[in-house]
Each structure stands twice: as C-alpha cells, then as structure tokens.
Amino acid sequence: MEGMNCGMCAMSIERALFELGAKGAVDLSGNSVTIEYNGSTIALDQINEAIEDLGYKV
C-alpha cells in the first residue's frame, strides 16, 4: 500500500472495508493492511477498488 501516512488514513481504509463487510487492520509502519473477508460475498476487486477510490495505491 502506498500513500498511507497517518491515523486518519488508517481510519478511512478501515471504514471503507467495514462498509463492504470486511474487517481491516492497517499497519502504518509496514505500509500494509490485513483484511478478513468472506470471498463468497465480497470480491477482492471490490476491496482493491474501495481502497484505490480513497487515493491509495494497492
């Protein structure tokens, strides 16, 4: 993940994932997000698009 640099970044990503029905844990120091989701209800493309729509590079 590129573009994350503060707590607000983390909150916006986690909120977008929550709205999709996924759970995310952002690691700012590692520039990564760990995501738990049900693949039968959410496609990985949907998750990537939601994060990219916020302005972050996946």
Image (tube, helix red, strand yellow):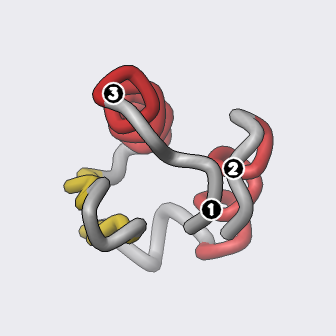
Residue 11: mark in rendering? 3
The tag earlier along the polypeptide, 1 or 2, is 1
Q: Distance between the residues labelled 1 and 3?
A: 15 Å
Kindly state the secondary structure of the residue where label 2 is placed: loop
Task: Give whichever of 38, 45 is nearer the camera.
Answer: 45
Label pair 1/2, CB-CB below 8 angstroms: yes
Vertical position of residue 13 compared to residue 48: above or below: above
Q: Name which residue type carries label 2.
A: Tyr
Task: Give whichever of 12, 42 is nearer the camera.
Answer: 12
- Quadrant in which the C terminus appears: bottom right
Where residue 21 appears, as percent x and y from the top left, is: 37, 44
Q: Residue 14, located in which quarter of the rendered image?
A: top left
Where residue 49 appears, as percent x and y from the top left, is: 76, 55
- Residue found at x 53% / y 63%: 42
Q: Name which residue type carries label 1.
A: Glu
Q: In this view, does 25 lie to the left or right of 49?
A: left
Q: Name which residue type carries label 3.
A: Met
Mark 1 surroundings: few (<14), some (14-19) or many (≥20) residues within 10 A? few
Mark 2 surroundings: few (<14), some (14-19) or many (≥20) residues within 10 A? some
Which residue position is annotated with label 1?
A: 2
Kindly state the secondary structure of the residue where label 3 is placed: helix
Residue 56: mark in rendering? 2
Q: Is residue 40 left or right of residue 27?
A: right
Task: Give whichever of 18, 30 is nearer the camera.
Answer: 30
**Hey, which residue is sitting farthest top in the picture?**
8
